[in-house]
Image (cartoon, rainbow, N blue to C red):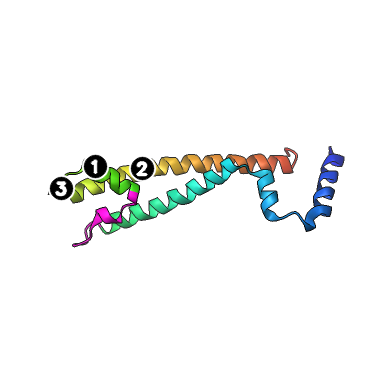
């Protein structure tokens, strides 16, 4: 087994001049994991937007609906009458529920990403 690992490392080392970081990345991570990474970035951005909305909810004159991401804004406006006197409360409730849903999604994506890292560590260390 050590000979196989040594030969693999030797081949990669000798061919290292033309092996780019991107090809090595593609060797260990499929396109699926790049979509997981992208989903984690998008989820983090949404959490930051939701936190900003909640932090500014009590500020007078702030249009909370306009701060929402476009897809969330469309979903909220399809459910909310335009001239509602409880618009601020509805937006806050919507943001809180979206934060919870987004948090569960981020947790799942992080677990998937972490399991891949553990698997790669086991491969590199030969399970030790």
Q: Quickly name the residue at label 1.
A: 78
Q: Earlier in the sequence, mark 2 or mark 3?
A: 3
Quarter assignment of residue 52: bottom left
Which residue lies at the image location 47% right of the left edge and 42% below the top edge? 107
Q: Quickly name the residue at label 3.
A: 86
Mark 2, residues whose alpha carbon is within 10 Å: few (<14), some, or many (≥20)? few
Q: Position of residue 2 (x, y in %)?
A: 85, 41
Q: Quadrant of the C terminus?
A: top right
Which SS does the magenta portion mostly show? loop
Location of residue 74 with respect to 18 vertically, above or below:
above
- Residue 23 in the figure: left or right of residue 38: right
Per the rendering, the mark at residue 100 is 2
Bounds of the magenta segment = 57-70
Which residue lies at the image location 67% right of the left edge and 42% below the top edge? 120
Residue 7 sits inside the magenta stretch: no
Mark 1, residues whose alpha carbon is within 10 Å: few (<14), some, or many (≥20)? few
């Amino acid at each position: 087994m050590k000979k196989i690992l040594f030969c693999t490392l030797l081949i990669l080392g000798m061919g290292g001049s033309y092996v780019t970081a991107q090809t090595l990345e593609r060797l260990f991570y499929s396109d699926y994991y790049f979509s997981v990474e992208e989903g984690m970035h998008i989820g983090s951005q949404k959490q930051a937007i939701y936190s900003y909305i909640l932090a500014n909810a009590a500020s007078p004159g702030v249009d909370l609906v306009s701060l929402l991401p476009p897809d969330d804004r469309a979903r909220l406006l399809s459910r909310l009458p335009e001239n509602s006197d409880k618009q601020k409360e509805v937006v806050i409730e919507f943001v809180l529920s979206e934060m919870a849903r987004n948090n569960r999604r981020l947790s799942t994506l992080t677990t998937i990403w972490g399991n891949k890292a553990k698997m790669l560590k086991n491969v590199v260390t030969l399970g030790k």
